[in-house]
Amino acid sequence: MEHISLEIVSEFVKKSNIDLKSTHERLCFPVIMRLYKKMKIGIRFSGIKVDGDLIIDGHHRYLASLLAGVCLERYPSNKTSAAKVSEWEVVEFVKDDWDTDSKILLLNKIDAEFNDITLEKLNELLK
C-alpha cells in the first residue's frame, strides 16, 4: 500500500485545486493518515457536511479521500458564526496524534460495523 507523509500532504494542498474550503486552521496528520490507509483498502465512510463550498464537518475525511482518490457524499449543513475560511496552503498539519488509543479502537469498531466486517477483519486488512 502506498504510504503518505506529512510532506506529501503539504505538497498536495499547495498544488491541488481543492474545491471545498477549510474552516479549520489546524488538522491532525496521524488522523488523515489512518483514514487514508482505510480508504485505500476499500473501507467506506459516511459523507461530510458542507455549507456551499465550506466544509462544516469532515475535514480529515475529505482530505484523506482526495489523497486516496475516493469520493465522499456531501450533506448540506449550516455554518456557525465561528466558522471562518482558512486557505488550504496555510492550514497547519499537526504531527501529534489527537486521538488516544482508546478512541482509535472505538473508531475502528465504528468503521468495521459501518462496513459490515468484524474488527478483527479490519485489523487484518490494515496490516
Image (tube, rainbow, N blue to C red):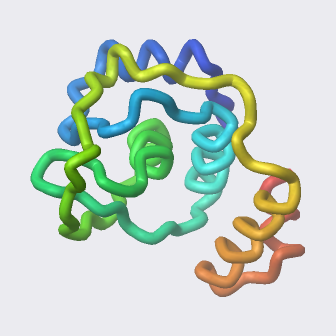
Q: Is residue 109 left or right of residue 35?
A: right
Residue 108 in the image: above or below residue 67: below
Query: Height in image: 45 above or below 29?
Result: below
Q: Which image quadrant is residue 125 in?
A: bottom right
- What x and y, as percent, mark residue 67? 46, 36
Image position of 44 with respect to 98: above or below: below
Residue 102, position in %: x, y? 86, 61
Callout count: 0
Which residue sits at x=43%, y=40%? 63
Question: What residue appears at the point 61 percent right and 79 percent down from the top-left corner?
Answer: 115
Name the residue located 44 percent from the left edge and 13 percent from the top edge.
Answer: 11
Residue ranking furthest to the front: 81
Whether residue 35 is situated above or below residue 90 in the rendered picture: below
Query: Which residue does the image show at 58% across and 40% down from the upper left?
Result: 32
The answer to whether residue 124 is left or right of residue 113 is: right
Q: Looking at the picture, tell me which residue is in the foreground, 37 or 34.
A: 34
Q: Position of residue 99 (x, y in %)?
A: 74, 48
Residue 93, percent from left and from top: 55, 23
Find the residue positioned furthest to the left. Answer: 52
Q: Work out which quarter of the rendered image holds the N terminus and state it.
A: top right
Left or right position of 83 against 40: left
